[in-house]
Image (cartoon, rainbow, N blue to C red):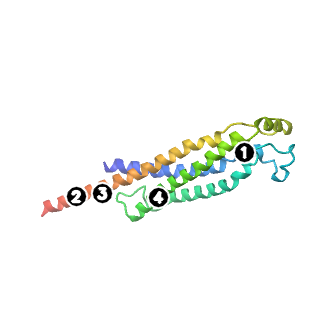
Amino acid sequence: MYKKQLFWQRIICLAALIASALVFAYSLGIMTDLYDLFGGMDLNKASDSRRVVQGFKIFYDMQPFNRTFTRLSIVLMLMAVLLFITNTHNRRRYYISNYISTGLYFAGSIALTVWAHRYIDLFRTDFVTRVDFAGLAQYAEKNKCYYTESTFWFDIHYALFAVLLLIAALLAANTVLKVVLMKKEKELLKQGEEAAV
């Protein structure tokens, strides 16, 4: 039982690191289509309808969110690295540092998911409802630039955050299992000592 538990413990910690790196990559990629669509449109020229398309301001509205999201994803990666620094992936017996690193990653994953999902969902709704796609298609054809109506970068967050939450739940379940196994081990050692006397 211990060997299997240690094997899965390593896998879960590695998965936590990979999931955190994917969240970071996503924070860099979420603005890709919006930049290609609206990056050439200038806020200062918003009154000139030949240079802008209705709804283009979503690109500028998302900038503060995206900066914060990127910073928080870096913090989440550091929390995943902390799992390895404290040997949470490899320890047969957990200490306070292991519980702290596990708790930080668990809480950080949930907090980031709830916060980011709320904003990404709002921005997706804005993109679908506020952007004049007919005008955008004409603008793209005239200026020979990128055009899409795809919400892929908004929609992919559902899968990404579901994986992140699953890994956080597995990490918490592993910690509970570790506590149970440590208690059983203590009882067996105590029984062995009593039998030797």
Q: Earlier in the sequence, mark 4 or mark 3?
A: 4
In the displayed structure image, the side of residue 119 where residue 102 appears, left or right: left
Would you name the residue on which mark 1 appears?
A: 34
The residue located at (86%, 37%) in the rendering is 142
Name the amino acid type tagged 3.
Answer: Met
Would you name the residue on which mark 2 appears?
A: 187
Decide: few, some or many residues near mark 4? Use Cα within 10 Å; few <14, some 14-19, many ≥20. many
Name the amino acid type tagged 1.
Answer: Leu
Name the amino acid type tagged 4.
Answer: Leu
Q: Nearer the viewer, mark 1 or mark 4?
A: 1
Q: Earlier in the sequence, mark 2 or mark 1?
A: 1
Name the amino acid type tagged 2.
Answer: Glu
- Residue 122 placed where, x, y %? 63, 46
Q: Secondary structure at mark 3?
A: helix
Decide: few, some or many residues near mark 3? Use Cα within 10 Å; few <14, some 14-19, many ≥20. some
Q: Do labels 4 and 3 touch, CB within 8 Å?
A: no
Q: Secondary structure at mark 4?
A: helix
The residue located at (61%, 40%) in the rendering is 155
- Between marks 1 and 4, how big is the CA–CA gap? 35 Å
Q: Earlier in the sequence, mark 2 or mark 3?
A: 3
- Between marks 1 and 3, how big is the CA–CA gap? 51 Å
Q: Do labels 4 and 2 touch, CB within 8 Å?
A: no
